[in-house]
Image (tube, rainbow, N blue to C red):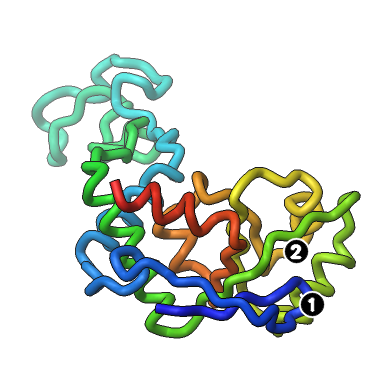
Amino acid sequence: MEVKVLDFNGKDTGRKVQLSDSVFAIEPNNHAVYLDVKQYLANQRQGTHKAKERAEVTGSTRKIKKQKGTGTARAGSIKNPLFKGGGTIFGPRPRSYSFKLNKSLKRLARKSAFSIKAKESNIIVLEDFKFETPNTKNFINVLKALGLENKKSLFVLGESNKNVYLSSRNLKASNVVTSSELSTYAILNTNNLVLLEGSLELIEENLSK
């Protein structure tokens, strides 16, 4: 599919780029997308939750009343989970939520995400640009020129550009990443995907392996 290339002022440069059908025009695999997003979100979890169990609660282990003759249920330690202040039964323990996915499945998920965005016409190709110094106002002007000032957007750079990244850091609705940092979650969790020309070849090369 062909997409026109815009400059950072939002104007048509008169050039077009050919997006690879094997990356941007496949039949999306929803299950692969689901698994990749699930893995990404699972990896964000710290897994440091912990509740004290019976052996960890502070308290005496003395039998609190005699076994028989009280008319109530037998009871041993005050740390019994049935008592207030006792231990927690099957409480959460620290654990890792991460799980493994094959590289081929993750590539399929990213290609599916790109294809979904392309089908929705939510991909913008922008010529490469740089800022001499970090300047949030300049980045806002780029967003306005592209009509993205009130939309969630993700800018994908071919190589790291500290000034562009720092210029966007204070804007909640916009993120800047390099092509190597892209994830299925990041692609889908945005309204508009802005691909700089320098990132296209790297994206297609990475996903065509």
Could you give the CA–CA distance between mark 1 and mark 2, rounded to whole angstroms?
Answer: 19 Å
Q: Is 173 left, or right, of 40 in this rendering?
A: right
Q: Quadrant of residue 173?
A: bottom right
- The location of residue 64, given as percent across then percent down, is 27, 23
Which quadrant does the N terminus fall into?
Answer: bottom left
Q: What label sits on residue 9 in the rendered view?
A: 1
Q: How crowded is mark 2: few (under 14 residues within 10 Å), some or many (20 or more)?
A: some
**Tag in front: 1 or 2:** 1
The type of residue carrying mark 1 is Asn
Q: Quadrant of residue 108?
A: bottom left
- The location of residue 32, given as percent across then percent down, is 23, 59
- The location of residue 132, given as percent across then percent down, is 89, 51
Q: What label sits on residue 205 in the rendered view?
A: none
Name the residue located 13 percent from the left edge and 40 percent from the top edge.
71
The type of residue carrying mark 2 is Leu
| Disc 2: which residue | 171
Helix, strand or loop at mark 2: loop
Name the residue located 31 percent from the left edge and 54 percent from the top edge.
36
Q: Where 83 sits versus 179, above or below? A: above
Q: Residue furthest left?
A: 68
Name the residue located 53 percent from the left edge and 70 percent from the top edge.
190
